[in-house]
Image (cartoon, rainbow, N blue to C red):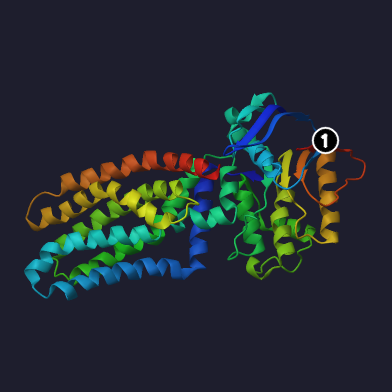
Amino acid sequence: MLEISNLACTRGDHQLFSGLNFSLSAGELLQVQGENGKGKTSLLRTLCGFIVPAAGEIRWRGQDIRELDEEYYAEMVYLGHLNAIKDELNALENLRISAGLAGCEVDDKQAVAALRHMGLRGRETLPVKVLSQGQRRRVALARLLVGNAPLWILDEPLTALDVGAVGLMQELIGTHLAKNGMVIFTTHQPLEVAGVETRRLTLV
Amino acid sequence: MNKLSLFGLLRLVISRDLMLAMRRRADVLTTLIFFVMVVSLFPLGVGPELGMLRKMAPGVVWVAALLASMLSLGRMFSADYLDGTLEQMLLAPQSLSVLVLGKILAHWMLSGLPLVLMAPVLGLQFDMSVQSLWVLVASLLLGTPVLSMIGAVGAALTLGLRGGGVLVSLLVLPLCIPVLIFGTGAVEAVTSGMSITSHLSLLGALLVLALVFTPWVTAQALRISME
């Protein structure tokens, strides 16, 4: 489904990686590894189309993602280092707005259910600025529950999460893969999903 | 789960920006108070000679509106840029131009519309006639959205730059000169008994032109800034 051929990325004069080839099909889990500064985030941002690759192609269902543009964006979710949530709004409003921007309208009931699943029961209507870092991350991750995009691109999804939430993420990724989803992620913490082999891509 | 229409997206973005502004009211008020203060300083500085005040009124109100709308430009995209919301907006499966148009309209409602509503009250300080006050409001109503739209392009281009706030004014102010000329021209025309249709039609034409092109240009500038 997602094919990367001969991909290269440069930032300024510095070449981060080149000649990168891999493909991802339905139900597969790919972990991008590498030391700090080796281009993990840049690779994920290139896959999102933020960065124009210096060389090579990224194809989704056989077509270049630059040509697909909005059709590709409808089928992917990206969660970056930044949570993309507003301090002034409460968790519920944040989730409904970010789901709306991602193209799907979510009613209060669905949003509350997603937040409760992420362990935020009783925090749904508190302004996000009073929540802890881990809880904010949970609000951001709740977006994965309300969409139905097959491709998830997760940049360090486990930062600031406690053991319980890491377990929840494993379960979430497991169910997504079982539904023929695809996940690409980076992390420095161990993340194994039961019954699924994690493919690894190491950037050097 | 329903798929959101383009109009639904426009409504979502506008209501979101208005809701955020209502929770952070100081930002909206500073623009308005700046406008009121700048306009009020002129009669105090120039002196109470009515003939002169009447003559300079449209220019003063328009220049103050221009400067006041520059104040809030920096905030148009920077908060969304810093907390990552802008990334998600670029990944929205609908037209980015429509989304940007929503942000521009919300910006105008928060920084342009209050100025339009306040202008007649300030005009009274300059002893403007009722007829010229109406024309002033009409010209501001047509002109201030153009300022927000041109400003959006500048704000998107200077996103993430150090000292972007000053740079955006330097970029945008020269481009706003036509709006200023036709805006003040309309009020001057009515006070000297001439027809105002040409000035207002030209302002309207600028508005339509900006409405068609600036959201798309801003969207492209945002994509460049995110790289």
Is B140 situated above or below A184? below
Q: Dot 1: what SS? A: loop
In the rendered image, which residue does mark 1 sit on?
Answer: A27
Residue found farthest to the right: A195
Is A149 situated above or below A164? above
Query: Which kind of residue does numbered mark 1 sit on?
Result: Gly
Q: Where is residue A48 in the image (x, y as percent from the top left)?
A: 64, 39
A143 with respect to B57 (left or right): right
Q: Mark 1 packing: few (<14 Cα in 10 Å), some, or many (20+)?
A: some
Residue found farthest to the front: A13
Is B59 situated above or below B104? below
Which of B145 and A7 lies nearest the eye of the viewer?
Answer: A7
Q: Position of residue B138 (x, y in %)?
A: 24, 55
A5 with respect to B176 (left or right): right
A90 with respect to B154 (left or right): right
Q: Position of residue A38 (x, y in %)?
A: 71, 42
Which of B219 and B108 lies nearest the eye of the viewer?
Answer: B219
Which of B68 and B166 lies nearest the eye of the viewer?
Answer: B166
Label 1: chain letter: A
The quadrant the C terminus of chain A occupies is top right
Q: Can residue A1 be seen in this view?
A: no
Q: Is residue B90 visible?
A: yes
For image coordinates 68% across by 39% down, the residue present is A43
For image coordinates 26% across by 69% down, the residue present is B38
For image coordinates 37% across by 48% down, the residue present is B149
